[in-house]
């Protein structure tokens, strides 16, 4: 029995709650994973897992062993990348999931720099606005905007995204330019609805000035659950948008979107990197998170995108 393979298989079964799912993510057969766990239990002389026809539950001994195993596996990963010389580079497969606009506008264009810095890291990137089960889907980290609802996850706040309210010139020519947020509640104005994954419903937006605090929901003819589709709907003139600056800057610079409600402010949207609990952060994940922090400090609020759209160079 290869003890490393057995410990890795055991940890993955615990995290996935299934021999089948564990085998898929480890690129092994279910039979191999089952045999590794049986050999591990025989060597330790304890029962690590309770198996039923529907699910796998970890025993008390198994839970205690799991906590030690995941730290040991992470330490082994770090040990392989902490030696001086050529082996110092972090390496391995990193599974991440990010919102589609963030991937398209910021992360993917900047990835050549990350890959040049860490050539031994392989990134498998899921691009979506859906809720991702980090444990079940064996994802190392997710990047999400808004306050985190799952308090079981570990998280690092990597940016505060400035928000604004925008509309396409074609929409304003048709519906008129609102001068006060409450006008968006009028029958002739429309917003583009964004269906948040947590609720499946659009949520109202808070706007404030020196004397008023408002929650504006508005009416929509279209609501979507994808950030790129949301932006496309606004550019097509289907309604008013609430956007982070990194999404609006280029289009505003080109005259494709117009900022509304000067003098009104929206609270910034926090952006988090979240990762599984009770798991030592590997070196590859640590450097990726640090790179995200560095990148978002430069790009989160759209200044570079706006300069690029206007043909301006950095100063």
Image (spheres, helix red, strand yellow):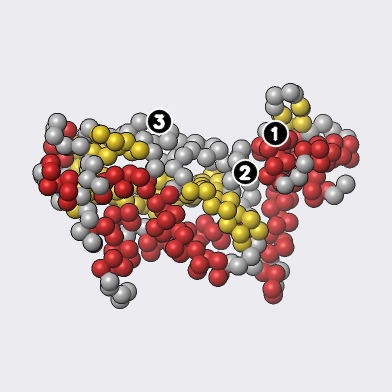
Q: Which mark is residue 18?
A: 1
Q: Earlier in the sequence, mark 1 or mark 3?
A: 1
* CA neighbours of label 2 inside 10 A, class few (<14), some (14 to 19), many (20+): some
Q: CA distance from mark 3 to mark 2?
A: 24 Å
Q: Which mark is residue 138?
A: 2
Residue contact at pointers 1 and 3, CB within 8 angstroms: no
Q: CA distance from mark 1 to mark 3?
A: 28 Å
Residue at the spot x=76%, y=27% of the render? Answer: 51
Drawn side of residue 172 relative to residue 154, left or right = left
In the depicted view, which residue is nearer to us: 20 or 272? 20
| Element class at badge 2 | loop
Q: Position of residue 13 (x, y in %)?
A: 71, 38
Please say if 289 is above or below 310: above
Quadrant for residue 222, please give it: top left
Residue at the spot x=80%, y=50% of the render? Answer: 4
Q: Position of residue 54 (x, y in %)?
A: 70, 24
Drawn side of residue 14 relative to residue 187, left or right = right
Residue at the spot x=46%, y=60% of the render? Answer: 108
| Element class at badge 3 | loop
Please say if 113 is above or below 95: below
Count numbered badges in the picture: 3
Q: Earlier in the sequence, mark 3 or mark 2?
A: 2
Q: Position of residue 93 (x, y in %)?
A: 64, 56
Q: Earlier in the sequence, mark 2 or mark 1?
A: 1
* CA neighbours of label 1 inside 10 A, class few (<14), some (14 to 19), many (20+): some
> Which residue is disc 3 drawn over?
199
| Element class at badge 1 | loop
Drawn side of residue 14 relative to residue 228, left or right = right
């Amino acid at each position: 029995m290869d003890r490393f393979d057995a410990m890795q298989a055991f940890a993955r079964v615990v995290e996935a709650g299934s021999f089948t799912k564990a085998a898929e993510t480890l690129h092994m057969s279910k039979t191999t994973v089952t045999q590794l766990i049986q050999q591990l239990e025989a060597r330790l002389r304890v029962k690590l897992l309770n198996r039923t026809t529907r699910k796998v539950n970890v025993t008390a001994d198994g839970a205690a062993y799991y906590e030690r195993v995941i730290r040991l596996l992470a330490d082994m990963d770090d040990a392989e990348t902490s030696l001086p010389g050529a082996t110092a580079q972090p390496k391995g497969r990193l599974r991440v999931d990010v919102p589609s606009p963030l991937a398209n506008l910021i992360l993917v264009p900047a990835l050549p720099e990350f890959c040049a810095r860490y050539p031994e890291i392989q990134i498998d990137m899921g691009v979506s606005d859906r809720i991702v089960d980090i444990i079940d889907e064996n994802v190392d980290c997710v990047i999400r905007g808004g306050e985190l609802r799952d308090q079981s996850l570990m998280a690092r706040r990597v940016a505060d995204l400035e928000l604004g309210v925008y509309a396409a010139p074609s929409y304003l020519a048709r519906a008129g330019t609102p001068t006060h947020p409450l006008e968006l509640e009028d029958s002739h104005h429309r917003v583009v609805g964004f269906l948040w994954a947590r609720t499946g419903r659009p949520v109202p937006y808070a706007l404030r000035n020196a004397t008023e605090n408002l929650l504006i929901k508005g009416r929509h003819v279209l609501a979507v659950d994808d950030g790129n589709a949301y932006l496309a709907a606004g550019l097509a003139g289907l309604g008013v948008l609430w956007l982070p600056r990194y999404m609006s800057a280029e289009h505003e610079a080109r005259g494709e979107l117009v900022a509304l409600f000067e003098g009104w402010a929206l609270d910034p949207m926090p952006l988090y990197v979240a990762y599984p609990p009770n798991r030592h952060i590997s070196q590859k994940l640590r450097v990726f998170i640090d790179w995200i922090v560095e990148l978002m400090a430069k790009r989160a609020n759209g200044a570079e995108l706006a300069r690029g759209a206007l043909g301006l160079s950095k100063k």
